[in-house]
Amino acid sequence: MQDRPDAGELIAAVRSFLEHEVLPTQSDQRGRFRTLVAANALAIVQRELAAGASAAQHEGDRLRALLGSQDGDVRALRLELARHIRAGEADESPRRDAVYAATLASVEAKLAIANPKLLELVQDGG
C-alpha cells in the first residue's frame, strides 16, 4: 500500500483492538485464549515486517559461508545443513563449532521475531 496507514500500522490497530477492546469482554476461557492467540500472531507479523528481509538474508549468508555454497535459497540451505548434521558430519569434526554458532544465530533470529521475551530470558540465563 502506498498511503497511510501502512501494513504495520493496520496490524498494530487490529492488535490493539483485540487486546484492549475484545479481550476484556471475553468471559469464556476459549474466547480469551483465541483472542490472545490472534493478538500474538499479529505481534509476530509486526516484528517480521519490521525485520524485513534482513533476518532471512543474514541466515542465508551464514549458511552459504558455512556450507561453501554460492547459491540456494534459505530453505534449501537449511535442508542441506540438516542432511550434514543427520549424517554426523558435525559431531566431532572441526566444523562442529561453526555449525553450532550458525545454528544458534538462526534460532536466536527466529526467536527475536516469534518470542522475544523467551529469547531475552534465555540470554539472561533464566
Image (spheres, rainbow, N blue to C red):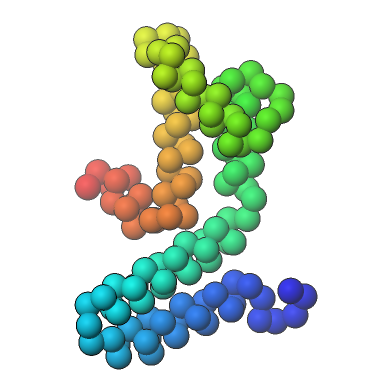
Compared across the picture, whether 78 is left or right of 121 comes to: right
Q: Residue furthest top?
A: 93
Quarter of the image for residue 92 reads top left
Q: Is residue 30 above or below residue 69?
A: below
Foreground residue among 85 and 12: 85
Compared across the picture, whether 30 is left or right of 59 comes to: left
Q: Residue furthest right?
A: 2
Q: Residue at x 23, y 87 (%)?
A: 27
Foreground residue among 82 and 124: 82
Q: Find residue 48 and report its horizontal and vertical position in percent.
A: 55, 58
Q: Is residue 11 above or below residue 70?
A: below
In the picture, which quadrant includes the N terminus? bottom right
Quarter of the image for residue 9 reads bottom right
Q: Find residue 97 and report its horizontal and vertical position in percent.
A: 42, 19
Q: How many marks?
A: 0
Q: Is residue 98 visible?
A: no
Q: Find residue 39 and report its horizontal and vertical position in percent.
A: 41, 73
Q: Find residue 98 and report its horizontal and vertical position in percent.
A: 47, 21
Q: Residue at x 43, y 20 (%)?
A: 85
